Amino acid sequence: MRRRKSRRDEHGESRAGGGAEAGDSPLPLFGGHEEEEPRAELPGEEPDAAPTPPEPDTSAAPTPPEPDTSAAAQPQDSATADPDPEPVPRSERSDRLDRARQAGIDGDVAVAIELYRELLLEDPRSPELRTTLGMLYDARGEHEAALEQYEAVRDDDPDNVENLLRLSNALAALSRFDVAERELRRIVKLDPNQAGAFLGLGIIYFRRGLYAQAEVELKRAIELDQHAALAYHYRGESLNQLSRVDEALAMLERAAQLQPEHARTYYVMGIVFDKKGRPHDAAAMYRKAREVTAA
């Protein structure tokens, strides 16, 4: 998980066991078919035990130190000395972090959420724990609960771009498009080269039916990140709605190359082929969409 920029020493995937890891910044998905399950980003672990001190070097003859008369320095009875001392036990917190992380890996989101909530009671200001918990809520579709965590992180670190991307994603998933757009515009001011912010704006405009505005924002997202599959997909959809079918097809083909498991891309390609008077190609794309959905 990326470390946050203030309380200045997630995201991050987050790694908020999930936590996300655009570059690495999280792309706003806004729920629906395009949504991908966030990886959980995890805060760091505590060390298992104190390191064993090295053996003294007897190759030279150092000046003898003053004798230590403390109780700890007194010799032990050979009959009671433990020749094989037990290692220092791991803390309960470390164990719970391990269990929370493993639950996230295993897909047991409910257990992971419960463990992270317990950990957060002990450290309520931890941005890493809140980000991880928010991403787990998002993965389960509980966007209101996720939003609460991201807002808490924003209160302590208002210019954390990765957190603002997650927050705007949750807002858009709740159809609070005006507030989501405001947060995304803040991101653009903080980081004019943040591809995820332009992607988010493009998706919001597309959902509102503002296809020309969506196409402009998505074009900028692609200029900044040429591997942003969702930007190609939504730009293709926007261009299709604008009857710019040749450009739409080029965008959708690139989206399918980058994200071949995205069934809707093939479905929209079928629509475009129908518009171009190519029914056999359209039928092949509809069939491909069904196959990917069933896989």
Image: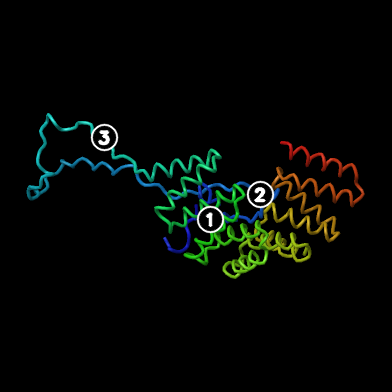
Label pair 2/3, CB-CB below 8 angstroms: no
Q: Residue furthest bottom?
A: 189
Image coordinates of residue 110 in percent, x first then y, are: 53, 43
Label 3: element kind:
loop
Q: Are marks 1 and 3 in contact (CB under 8 Å)?
A: no
**Image-quadrant location for residue 237:** bottom right
Q: How is the image coloured?
A: rainbow
Compared across the picture, whether 205 is left or right of 243 comes to left
As drawn, the label of residue 35 is 2
**Where is residue 151 shown, x and y percent of the image?**
53, 62
- Cβ–Cβ below 8 Å for labels 2 and 1? no
Disc nearer the start of the sequence (2/1): 1
Q: Earlier in the sequence, mark 1 or mark 3?
A: 1
For marks 2 and 3, the one nearer the N-term is: 2
Residue behind mark 3: 86
Three-letter amino acid code at the position of disc 1: His
Q: Mark 2: few, some, or many residues within 10 Å (few <14, many ≥20)? A: some
Disc marking residue 11 = 1
Taking the image as shown, residue 6 lies to the left or right of residue 108, namely: left
Q: With respect to residue 160, does 20 lie above or below?
A: above
Q: Residue placed at 7% from the left, 48% from the top?
A: 67
